[in-house]
Structure formats: C-alpha cells, structure tokens
C-alpha cells in the first residue's frame, strides 16, 4: 500500500513514546519520510493539546489530531479545535463532590478547552502524574463550577484504586464515558481513570474526521496500546498494536509489531504498510 493512499493515527503514551515519554529519532524519521511520500499523520491521544505540545518536539502532523480521548479534534498546524464535546455538569458535579468526600487524597484533573485544572494542592500531587500533565493550574474544585468541561482524570494511590474503580463503574452507565488507563514511566506504573461526555471515544472523533478532506478516500491505520485505544482500533481499517499493548488491544488488532521501546511506529511504516 502506498503512503499517499493512507492516514495514520498514533497513540502517544506506550505507542509513539518510549518509557521516557520521548519520540525516538527512528520514529521521527519514519513519520517524516511517510509524510514526504504523501502519507497523512496525526496523533490520537488522551492528552490535551497544550499538554501534548510539550512532548511533541520536532514532530510534523499534516492532519487533524484526536485529543482528549476523542472529546476533541485539534489542528496543531493552526492551533485550533475543529470540534469539542462537553460534559453534563449536572451529572458530573455531584459525582466529583461525592468522590472527593469519600476518597481522601483523590487527585482530580478537570480539563477545559484551554487548560488543565488540578483540584489538589501541588505538594499533595503524585509527582510523576503531575510532571506528565503540565502545564496546569492548581485550584479548589469549587473554582471549576460553571466552566465547560471536556474531560476529567482521576487518580488515587494504589491501595484505594479498587474503591475508585467500583464507584466510577456504578456511576458511569448512562451518564459518562469511562476509560481506565495505565502509564508506564521508567519502571513506574500509574493506573488512573478518565471520564468523558457520554458516547465519546477516540472512535467517535475518527468517525467525524472521516468526513474531512484530509481523510477522504484514504485507508485509516491506527496504532495504540491501551484500553482507551480499543474503540479507535476497532474503527480503523488497519489496527496495529506494539508488543507492550494490553491483551485486549492485541486481540482486536490485525498486526502486533515491536514494542514502543523498539520504535513501533517506524516498524509499522517500514514493514507493515509496504506489505499490504
């Protein structure tokens, strides 16, 4: 298959990024060669645009990106959203108030289109999670009331994670889209949960983007490793997972390639795409 017949959406953490949250020179070179040959490339991430930019040094994108786990599509070339979904605050606010009261130490990140609001004092935040989600602003939860919210990220220490998961699964049906996820950073594993507007996923954004000129007539490749990538992988024409992906992602993918530490996106573009 020729690059100019395709578009590739790549997840960041655990897929395009290595365990140091960097894009390897091998991945970067392969993506730029793919673009130069007529391919279209964009990221598909749970991260907010302003946060992702801090990790995308030197990366070219020539198609709209999927951000915020599909709550938005963002054009990094022009610095603007194409569309964005918002949460129902009448359902969200009682849930978050209850969780904050019930689970001491709960870290709540509230995402607007413009910024990440951390509802916990900086000194009480999990250091790695905080480092991965800057820039942010530290506020009280009450300061977020009335703001349009596109996503929330929730984290608690491992000994209370099961309690948080049960509370969210009980509250989510019919009210929110729930995406559990893990980040593996330099030997540390952080498990957290994200809640988005009902019906929203990376696949939701892909379905809308298929109507844009950038995707017209192109075969959609998607690469991802985690639970929040499952719907995107199902919606793609060709789904690819790195070797470090969760079993659920591998089970629904057409190809599994090398791990994110071994330049999975370069392998996809250099080996899998030419073989089709």
Image (cartoon, grey):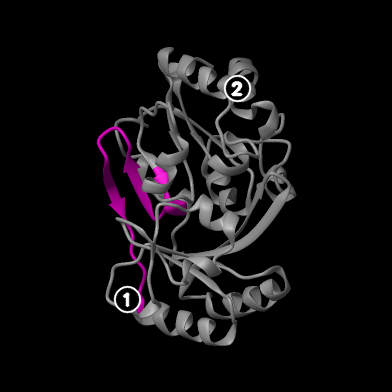
Query: Callout 1: helix, strand or loop?
Result: helix
Q: Position of residue 186 (x, y in %)?
A: 69, 44
Q: Position of residue 275 (x, y in %)?
A: 64, 16
Observer-side mark, 1 or 2, equals 1
Q: Position of residue 52 (x, y in %)?
A: 44, 43
**Near-viewer residue (52 or 213):** 52
Residue 254 sits in quarter: top right
Residues at badges 1 and 2 in contact (C-beta under 8 Å)? Answer: no
Q: Is residue 187 left or right of residue 23?
A: right
Residue 273 sits in quarter: top right
Residue located 67% across and 44% down the image: 252
Residue located 52% across and 57% down the image: 130
Q: What is the quadrant of the C terminus in the image?
A: top right
Q: Is residue 96 left or right of residue 27?
A: left
Residue located 44% across and 59% down the image: 200
Q: Is residue 68 magenta?
A: yes
Q: Which residues are magenta?
A: 66-89
According to the image, label 2 marks what residue? 266
Q: Is residue 256 visible?
A: no
Q: Is residue 165 visible?
A: yes
According to the image, label 1 marks what residue? 143
Q: Is residue 118 magenta?
A: no
Q: What is the quadrant of the N terminus in the image?
A: top right
Q: Is residue 175 above or below residue 68?
A: below
**Near-viewer residue (227 or 262):** 262
Query: Callout 2: helix, strand or loop?
Result: helix
């Amino acid at each position: 298959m020729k690059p100019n017949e395709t578009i590739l959406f790549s997840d960041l953490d655990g897929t395009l990024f290595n365990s140091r949250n960097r894009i390897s020179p091998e991945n970067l070179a392969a993506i730029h060669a793919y673009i130069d040959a007529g391919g279209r490339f964009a990221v598909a991430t749970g991260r907010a645009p302003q946060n992702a930019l801090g990790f995308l040094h030197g990366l070219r994108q020539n198609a709209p990106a999927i951000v915020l786990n599909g709550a938005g599509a963002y054009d990094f070339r022009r610095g603007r959203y194409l569309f964005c979904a918002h949460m129902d605050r009448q359902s969200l606010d009682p849930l978050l108030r209850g969780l904050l009261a019930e689970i001491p130490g709960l870290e709540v990140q509230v995402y607007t289109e413009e910024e990440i609001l951390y509802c916990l004092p900086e000194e009480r935040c999990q250091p790695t999670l905080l480092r991965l989600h800057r820039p942010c602003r530290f506020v009280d939860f009450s300061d977020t009331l009335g703001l349009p919210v596109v996503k929330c990220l929730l984290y608690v220490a491992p000994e209370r994670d099961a309690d948080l998961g049960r509370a969210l699964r009980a509250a989510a049906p019919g009210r929110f889209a729930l995406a559990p996820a893990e980040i593996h950073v330099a030997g540390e594993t952080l498990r957290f949960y994200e809640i988005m507007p009902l019906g929203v996923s990376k696949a939701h954004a892909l379905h809308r983007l298929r109507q844009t000129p950038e995707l017209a007539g192109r075969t959609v490749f998607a690469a991802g490793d985690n639970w929040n990538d499952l719907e995107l992988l199902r919606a793609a024409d060709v789904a690819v997972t790195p070797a470090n992906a969760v079993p659920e992602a591998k089970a629904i993918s057409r190809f599994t390639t090398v791990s994110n530490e071994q330049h999975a996106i370069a392998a996809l573009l250099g080996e899998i795409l030419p073989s089709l």
